[in-house]
Image (tube, rainbow, N blue to C red):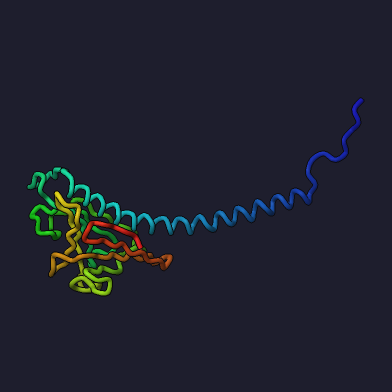
Amino acid sequence: MKPHAKNLGFTIIELLITMGIFSVLTSVVLANYFTFGANSEFVNASEDVVLSLRQAQVYGAGTKKSAGACSFDCAYGVHFAANTPHGFTSFVDTNNNGKYDAGEGTEAVIWNDAISVTGIKCGLITSDCVGDITNGAMMDVTFKRPSPDARISDLAFNGYKSGWITLSDANTGKTITIAISLAGQISVQ
């Protein structure tokens, strides 16, 4: 006959300690989950800009045929404007003027209202593109084959050596700047 074991199972203290540890870990995970969601939308918006610029560069320097008026000689670009602060437009520059014209848009990217373009700079990081962020500033970045170099322009000038787009998130207060150089380098700062 086997002896009967007296101490099988958990004590109430062990159970309370385990529940306490589980509660603390759950609250930490849930608190960080909501912060992660807000941050990921903002990071995705900045990556939207970078990927659209890179896509325009690849299409412009490559041989993507557009469905419009040009065969292989169109420039591809991205249009940023103060009057549409919650997004941007990718376009095919069918008349090759280096600027976005009505009807050239191929894809509009729109973010939620908390994420917006709060700065559009051309030439120098201290100089706004023609117009300011409240009065119609805009910047177009185009790429045309055979060169991967960027053509950066605003309303008045078509040949800046660099451009900057600043995005801000009203929910978190974070900002991020995307720089575009004449050589076609795109970087997040």
Residue 179 place in picture, x, y as percent: 29, 62
Residue with the most extreme top position: 1
- Relative vertical location of residue 165 with respect to residue 25 in this rendering, above or below: below
Identity of the residue drawn at 15% across and 59% down: 100
Identity of the residue drawn at 29% across and 52% down: 51
**For the C terminus, which image quadrant?**
bottom left
Direction from residue 41 to residue 105 in the image, left or right: left
Identity of the residue drawn at 59% across and 56% down: 27
User: From where the camera sits, is residue 92 visible?
Assistant: no
Quadrant assignment, res 37: bottom left
- Relative vertical location of residue 43 with respect to residue 63 in this rendering, above or below: below
Quadrant assignment, res 167: bottom left
Residue 158 place in picture, x, y as percent: 13, 65
Direction from residue 5 to residue 93 in the image, left or right: left
Identity of the residue drawn at 19% across and 47% down: 59
Residue 50 place in picture, x, y as percent: 30, 55
**For the N terminus, which image quadrant?**
top right
